[in-house]
Image: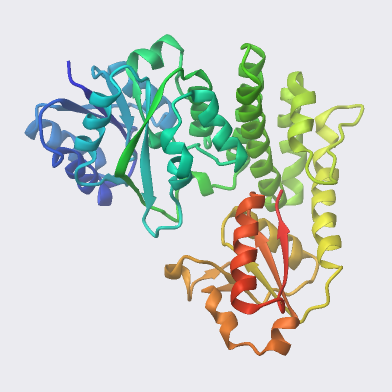
Amino acid sequence: MPLLSIVIPAYNTEPYLAECLDSVIDQGGDNFEIVIVDDCSTDNSGVLADEYAAKYEHVQVLHHGTNLGVSVSRNDGIREAQGDFVLFLDSDDRLFEGAFDALRGTLENEPNTDVVVCRVISQHGEYSNAYMFDGAATTIKDPDAYLLHLNRDNFHPECCWHYAIRRSFLVENGLFFLDVKIAEDQEFVARLLCEMQSFALCPGEFYWYRERDHSLKKSMDIEASLSLIQVADSLCEFSKSRQFSQTRQEFLRLRIQHALSLFSARLIMHEPDEVPLLSKLVGKFERNSDTLVEGFDREHINFSVGSDGFESSLNGYREILAGDLLDKIGQYKFEDLYLYCTGLIGKATARILTSNGIPITGVLDDNQTLAGQSMGDIDISASDILDRKSTEELEKTLIIVCNQKVMLFERIRKNLKKRYGNSLQIVHNFF
């Protein structure tokens, strides 16, 4: 029986699959297996996977006859895996050299652990889970104390490839993926970390994440948006079925709130004629209406459900979210307006502003590779474009920082103030 099973769901990632597989095989040793689940790819991903299986005896391929989605693919991989520990690797990402050596060393030092947290770095360096290894976290051994650390920053530990997990722990706790279009790992990881009784941190660079423009999480269709409601509803049910500590309950509350915040931003992005259908679908989850309403509520904005339930609520909530942003910036006098960050929150913020006739000068992002590109019709620049402005111009500039976390906003605000003094006007928008 191998120590490690690497489960790789693959769907139309032929340009990246060989690099992904080579990054595992090149780790060396023979105490691992690779389980590739080809989800009915229409390119040559399945053919390439079969070529690797023919060449390497510790590579096997499962082929789906129809496209079933990443959740089913990962679940099939868990069931097929023979290793003591399961790792999830997306077929367009890769492992760093020496990743397995570091993991094996961690398991030798912590032989009874159920969950190992591994370090992730993204293609452009913007995304990482460094906070999970931050400061005092490296000395924490108690799972509740570790979750308390995550709660303090409302960190989102939501990607399943952060973790190496004992397979018996997965099976015994029924830890399989919810079959939804997006955010399946948000739900999975929330349950994983609440169930864990032991954990360890694996030092060193482990996982390299590729940011792609056409990934499923960026899909804006109704099914994708509804996935976030399904995730929140599933976590509500999970919370009710367990007697967790206050820390774990708070962790789940934050995860539910995060899913609904992302849904709220996506709600802004939907066309008005899509909202009635979306409202009707959301209405199916009224069994947890109290918890869902609490999750929708945020600073001085309350989500209310009418007498006919959720079906009439989303349009009103959409208008409240837009009105809150307009009221917020209405307190400032400015000639130039920049959005800071290009993600979903930035796009939803831009949608509100442009639909209300408020021009946006540009978008700022710390990802240098995005400079010169555009978000819709809005140019993206590095933040140092503000260097060109005089003090007088800076005083007439408003920056809207678009992200979900107060602590991240405070860091961005502090950095901007340090660089440009108190000239800039800076506000935070979140959903």
Q: Quadrant of the N terminus?
A: top left
Q: Residue at x 22, y 30 (%)?
A: 104
Q: Quadrant of residue 348?
A: bottom right
Pick the residue in front: 90 or 72: 90
Q: Is residue 272 above or below residue 30?
A: below
Question: Quick check: 260 left or right of 189?
Answer: right
Q: Quadrant of residue 232?
A: top right
Q: Is residue 69 visible?
A: no
Residue 121 position within the rendered picture, expressed as x and y whole percent measured from the top left: 37, 50
Q: Residue at x 79, y 39 (%)?
A: 297
Q: Is residue 243 above or below residue 380?
A: above
Pick the residue in front: 252 or 362: 252
Pick the residue in front: 348 or 162: 162
In the rendered image, the residue lying farthest to the left is: 55
Residue 154 position within the rendered picture, expressed as x and y whole percent measured from the top left: 61, 41
Residue 258 position within the rendered picture, expressed as x and y whole percent measured from the top left: 64, 39
Q: Residue at x 33, y 26 (%)?
A: 65
